[in-house]
Amino acid sequence: MEMLFENVFIIGTGLMGTSLALAMKSSGEIGEIQGYDANSEHVVKALELGGIDRIGQLKDVDGCDLVVLAIPVEGAKDVLGRILPFLKEGTVVTDVGSTKREIIKAFETLHRCMKDKDVNFIGGHPMAGSEKSGPDGAIQDLFKGKTYVLVRTSSCSDEMFEKFRALVVKMDALPVEMDAELHDRIVSVTSHLPQVISYVLVQTLIDYAREDERYVNLVGSGFRDTTRLATSAPAVWIDIFKQNKDNITDALNHFQAQIEWFKGMIETERYEELSESVTKIVSFKERL
């Protein structure tokens, strides 16, 4: 039986890359998966876990019909430029980054330099993840039931876009097509802002604990749950903050205004009004 993609190459075998490899294998729609990672321990572990079938080098993308960039968003732009000359005609290339405008802009610039070589680039962002990193945290079902954003580019044929969408469905994810601008604006609120808040909450505790370590002694499950994201890899997030600076700044301005409003409610003892607002918040959250 013909598979959707016979030869896949995954660049970056950390949490996302290895989880994606495992999900692709479970779909039954993939032939062989090669993997590459600058961290040799990661790629060896991905091989041991059965996520990839063999370890390759970047030039080995030349025999693949699907290439996945599963590395931090700034690094993805650099690697894209390095692999593009090796890609065969008709290859599908996608990424899993949390920002879409920059990687698509980088591809379009590189593509023009290659005299419009036949490469089907699809911006991808599976809305799934973990505060963990590395292949040890990989989960085969990480994408099950999760939204998987797909951004169509002008270089991608309808046939190849639908082929990759079909693979996403086979991984039990929920494909949603969206343009890059809208994607980056929305995730600045739903993904990037919570990360910033988590980091800042921990920094707030650090500030208080400098004066009295008993603050740390009284950290409970509420603080731990709320700051789970604060253990996420800084290198990954600094790249995201850099690439989506304008939208994240807008989201932070709105959040800051909400904090000032909440503070004002407490300072002026408008508890009945605050209770009504919080009740609406709880109701909305329960529907998510």
Image: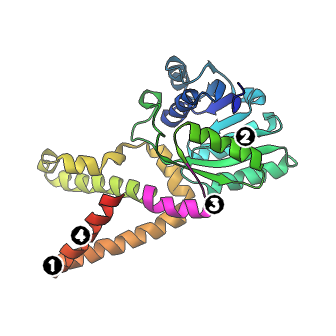
- Label 4 is placed on what type of residue? Val
Q: Report the side of 227 relative to 121 (left or right).
A: left
Magenta segment: does it hold 198?
Answer: no
In the rendered structure, are the residues bearing label 2 and label 1 in contact, judged by CB atoms less than 8 Å apart? Answer: no
Give the mark nearer the N terminus: 4 vs 2.
2
Q: Is residue 192 above or below residue 49?
A: below
Picture residue at 58% right of the left edge, 64% below the top: 182
Give the mark nearer the N terminus: 3 vs 4.
3
Q: Which residue is mark 4?
A: 278
Quadrant where the C terminus sits is bottom left
- Label 3 is placed on what type of residue? Asp
Quadrant where the N terminus sits is top right
Disc assigned to residue 272: 1
Disc assigned to residue 92: 2
- Label 2 is placed on what type of residue? Val
Disc assigned to residue 179: 3
Q: CA distance from mark 4 to mark 2?
A: 47 Å
Q: How many marks?
A: 4
Residue 162: % across, % down: 69, 46
